[in-house]
Amino acid sequence: MPELNDDDIRVLAKAVNLDIQDSDITDVKHSLNAMLDAIESINPEGINGIEPLPVIFQTGD
């Protein structure tokens, strides 16, 4: 999986309604890429045959 860049971080943050300051983007990017690498190394047998469930957040409109 390719590493996330600054724009990817901004898009993901906006998707979950987070405001990440430009000064924090580098730290967030480093942390998320490290977590994705760790998750990628976990590969239980049969995991790729399971369809992911959508995550739906309700806003307080």
Image (spheres, helix red, strand yellow):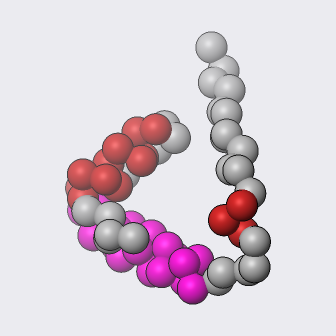
Q: Measuring 48% from the left and 80% from the top, which residue is drawn there?
A: 37
Residue 24 screen position, x and y as percent: 31, 64
Residue 11 screen position, x and y as percent: 35, 44
Does the magenta segment cover residue 31?
A: yes
Q: Main secondary structure of the magenta part?
A: helix
Q: Nearest the camera: 58 or 8?
A: 8
Image position of 53 (left or right of 25)? right
Q: Is residue 24 visible?
A: no
Quadrant, the N terminus? bottom left
Compared to residue 5, the image places residue 3 above or below, namely: below
Q: Measuring 24% from the left and 59% from the top, which residue is drawn there?
A: 6
Q: Nearest the camera: 2 or 18?
A: 2
Image position of 44 (left or right of 9)? right
Q: Nearest the camera: 24 or 57?
A: 57
Does the magenta segment cover residue 56?
A: no
Residue 43 screen position, x and y as percent: 66, 81
Image position of 42 (left or right of 44)? left
Q: Measuring 72% from the left and 69% from the top, which residue is drawn there?
A: 47
Magenta segment boundaries in residue numbering: 23-41
Q: Measuring 49% from the left and 73% from the top, which residue is drawn there?
A: 36
